[in-house]
Image: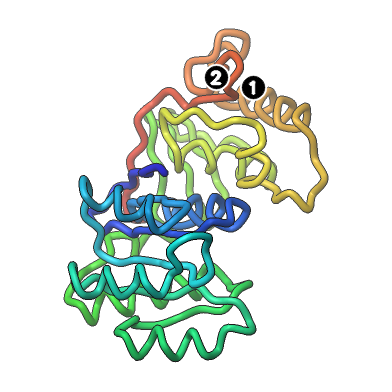
Amino acid sequence: MAAHAADTAVTILLVDDERTLREPLVDYLVGQGFVVLEAESAAAARSLLREKKADLALVDIMMPGEDGLSLTRHLIETQNLPTILLTAMGEATDRIVGLEIGADDYVTKPFEPRELVARIRSILRRAGRTAAGDESEDAHYLFEGWRLDPLKQRLTDPQGTVIPISTAEFRMLRAFLDHPRAVLDRDRLLDMVQGREAHLFDRAVDNQVSRLRRKIEDDSKQPHFIQTVRGGGYRFAADVTRVPG
């Protein structure tokens, strides 16, 4: 289990045993301005919530051990936690039961992440919470004088000069900016930047990083921003803030 911080007070608990769904969804939610508490089971979620507080839960219904319906009932009864169920196509009865025990909504896998975020924000508004990520679609990234406009995919250096970057370079840079100072291994970067369906390989990540370093580093051979972590991947070694576009 893990916690992923973002620049907002709204915290989402994500409980799903499928790593291939959970990790990309964590990346997307963090990119939208949420803090994400990640758990692979109901037991892990219960343990996590003994130390941390969430504002809304996303709970997979079908999990090994304690199922999502039991966990949802617990979250509602003990914490009155707004909950969205993550369900498979054939789980209509479970969806009904989930709504009957107090779940606020459900989405059916596979789902569109933007739709899920819209539902999250709607539920938070009804609960009297404001998601600071509401403006994050066009919020610019700032790091040591550099600026990245995510809508225009435009990178500007500290002198105000626009630095041309490809779509692939933009995706790679945004992945780093969404996870400042975190170590990202090559598999995680592939998932965030291209998706596993792209059939890329580790060397492709290294090549993209090399090209990006040439764009933003004073000395690409002694990088300040994108640092290599031996045996671990890469880390963006600077603080990142977001401001309205």
Residue shown at 59%/58% (left/top)?
A: 21
- Asked if 80 appears above or below 141 in the picture, the reply is below
Instruction: Kindly indicate the quadrant of the structure image that contains residue 45.
Output: bottom left
Q: Are marks 2 and 1 in contact (CB under 8 Å)?
A: yes
Residue shown at 56%/38% (left/top)?
A: 173
What is the distance, in whole Å, between disc 2 and disc 1 at their CAs? 6 Å
165 to the left or right of 244: right
- Asked if 7 appears above or below 78 in the picture, the reply is above
- Give the numbered dot on residue 217: 2
Near mark 1 (Cα within 10 A), the count class, few <14, some 14-19 or many ≥20, is: few
Q: What is the secondary structure assignment of the residue under circle 1?
A: helix
201 to the left or right of 37: right
| In the image, farthest residue toward the top | 222
Residue that carries the numbered disc 1 in the rendered image: 214
Near mark 2 (Cα within 10 A), the count class, few <14, some 14-19 or many ≥20, is: some
- Give the numbered dot on residue 226: none
Give the x, y percent position of residue 155. 53, 40
Residue shown at 69%/43% (left/top)?
A: 168
Q: Amino acid at mark 2?
A: Glu
1 to the left or right of 91: left
